[in-house]
Amino acid sequence: MSKHIKALILALALAVCMLPLQAHAVDSYRYLHVTIDTIWYIFLVLAPLVLAPFAVLMWIYWRRAARQKDEPGRDDEPR
């Protein structure tokens, strides 16, 4: 592309960026009715997501400890 076309594209992009975008300013509460219970719903969704990795780690640790206990002559050295 020539320098003039690049400059024209840049000028148009800057002009579009400077336009007021009030049409995109949407009231976020219009689609979601926010009450005091909403916080609890968010907590009940996020708590399992945060605690699930710990549960998986405990299960893996328990399974590995049981497996090493069943194998005779095996040291407690990590693999």
Image: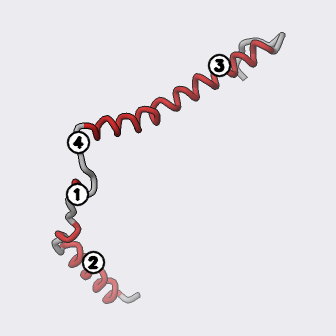
Q: Residue 35 carries which label?
A: 4
Q: In terms of secondary structure, where does tag 3 sit?
A: helix
Q: Which mark is residue 13?
A: 2
Nearer the viewer's eye, disc 1 or disc 2?
A: 1
Q: Residue at x 69, y 16 (%)?
A: 65
Nearer the viewer's eye, disc 3 or disc 1?
A: 1
Earlier residue among tags 1 and 4: 1
Residue 17, picture quadrant? bottom left
Residue tagged 1: 30
Q: What residue type is labelled 2?
A: Ala
**Are there few (<14), some (14-19), or many (20+) residues within 10 Å of tag 4?**
few
Q: Is residue 51 above or below residue 38?
A: above
Nearer the viewer's eye, disc 2 or disc 3?
A: 3
Q: Which amino acid does label 1 sit on?
A: Arg
Q: Is residue 68 above or below residue 16?
A: above
Earlier residue among tags 3 and 4: 4
Q: Residue 38 carries which label?
A: none
Earlier residue among tags 4 and 2: 2
Distance CA(mark 3)–CA(mark 4): 42 Å
Q: Residue at x 21, y 78 (%)?
A: 15
Residue tagged 3: 62
Earlier residue among tags 3 and 1: 1
